[in-house]
Image: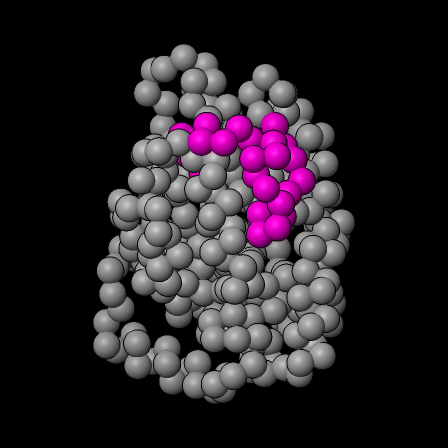
Amino acid sequence: MSSDPSARPATTLADDSQDSNGALNDQPEESTLATLSHFSPEKEAAATAVLSVQGEGAGMTAFQLTKLHKEYTRSWDLFYKRNTTNFFKDRHWTEREFPELRAEGGEPCSKHLLELGCGVGNFIFPLLDSNPELYIYGCDLSTRAVDFVKANAMYTEERCKAFVCDITTDKLTDTVPAASLDLVSALFVLSAIPPEHMSLAVENIRTVLKPGGKVLVRDYGLYDAAQLRFKASSKMADRFYARHDGTFSYFFSTESVAALFAEGFELVSNAYVVKDVVNRKRALNMERVFVQSTFRKI
Ligand SMILES: C[S@@+](CC[C@H](N)C(=O)[O-])C[C@H]1O[C@@H](n2cnc3c(N)ncnc32)[C@H](O)[C@@H]1O
């Protein structure tokens, strides 16, 4: 996701406004093809053949891997230094995809939500506008991203609170009261975390959710066009890659998301959302795959 001019030729993917190389979105058209519980054997075979070119293990040296891990936080901060607020599109689709986010006629700020890895607020601000019932916390490990959220004209501490937090190392309860949240949203953030640290993030989420509170996940899915385009030299581990700018991307199967939330949560829904993205300007047609899942804290 870099704007590094030496990156490979840019191709635009939709929905999360990014591709594996860092191209800005230039208005592709997209349509949902299907919501799937499993891939067809044909899709599995075609995707596996493409992925086999990436090889079995990591395609980089131990030195490169250590450096990438060490610079993880800095890479995201530099991402926001370069792109400021111009990279991700506002998430206007969230209420359509997650009914839990829709206003139900309750009191202002009567529901509390935390957006993990909130970036510059593309999820927070459209939702604050459309649902007065919500009080929204947003956290991100990038100080620059959090500063952009706080600088937004819609930011008001009566409705929201943005704070810096690495959800794999810092306790969310330092800012958010324990067991106080109705909802936690995780949009394209778990995939940014090294797989071995994801369960630390999930345990952290559990501490701030009320019993019965829900986690809403949307993230990159297995065999997504972005995964199939990575070269072996970008592969850090199975289904886990580094982009040119040093940020990471994991591609989830529905089983791997469910396994993360297997303890202390019950499954509400879990599926692949497959979209056809057409970019006429660049004569490109791509199949984007996302996982979309909801879990309830027991
Ligand atoms: C792909 S962006 C998604 C931003 C936002 N959720 C959205 O959908 O527009 C991933 C975000 O997660 C943040 N992030 C990555 N690892 C994190 C961690 N361990 N703790 C908190 N935030 C993290 C990054 O800084 C980045 O802002």
Give residue 291's quadrant in the image. Answer: bottom left
**Percent of width and height locating residue 194:** 55, 63
> Relative to residue 210, is residue 13 drawn left or right?
right
- Residue sticking out furthest to the top: 107
Can residue 28 be seen here? no
Q: Which residue is depicted at the point 61% across and 69% down?
A: 242
Task: Specify how the rendered protein is coloured.
Answer: one colour
Q: Is residue 77 above or below residue 208?
A: below
Q: Which residue is depicted at the point 35% across and 33% down?
A: 211
| Quadrant of the rendering where the C terminus is positioned | top left
Q: Is residue 142 above or below residue 18?
A: above
Q: How many marks?
A: 0
> Relative to residue 267, is residue 190 drawn left or right?
right
| Quadrant of the rendering where the N terminus is positioned | bottom right
| Camera-nearest residue between 82 and 253 | 253
Can residue 161 be seen here? yes
Q: Which residue is depicted at the point 40% across and 53% down?
A: 30
> Relative to residue 200, is residue 44 drawn left or right?
left
**Percent of width and height locating residue 94:** 41, 39
What range is drawn magenta here?
161-184
Q: Which residue is depicted at the point 69% across and 47% down?
A: 142
**Percent of width and height locating residue 209:** 43, 35
Q: Is residue 10 above or below residue 215?
A: below
**Percent of width and height locating residue 205:** 47, 43
Give residue 7's quadrant in the image. Answer: bottom right
| Camera-nearest residue between 269 and 265 | 265
Residue 42: in magenta span? no
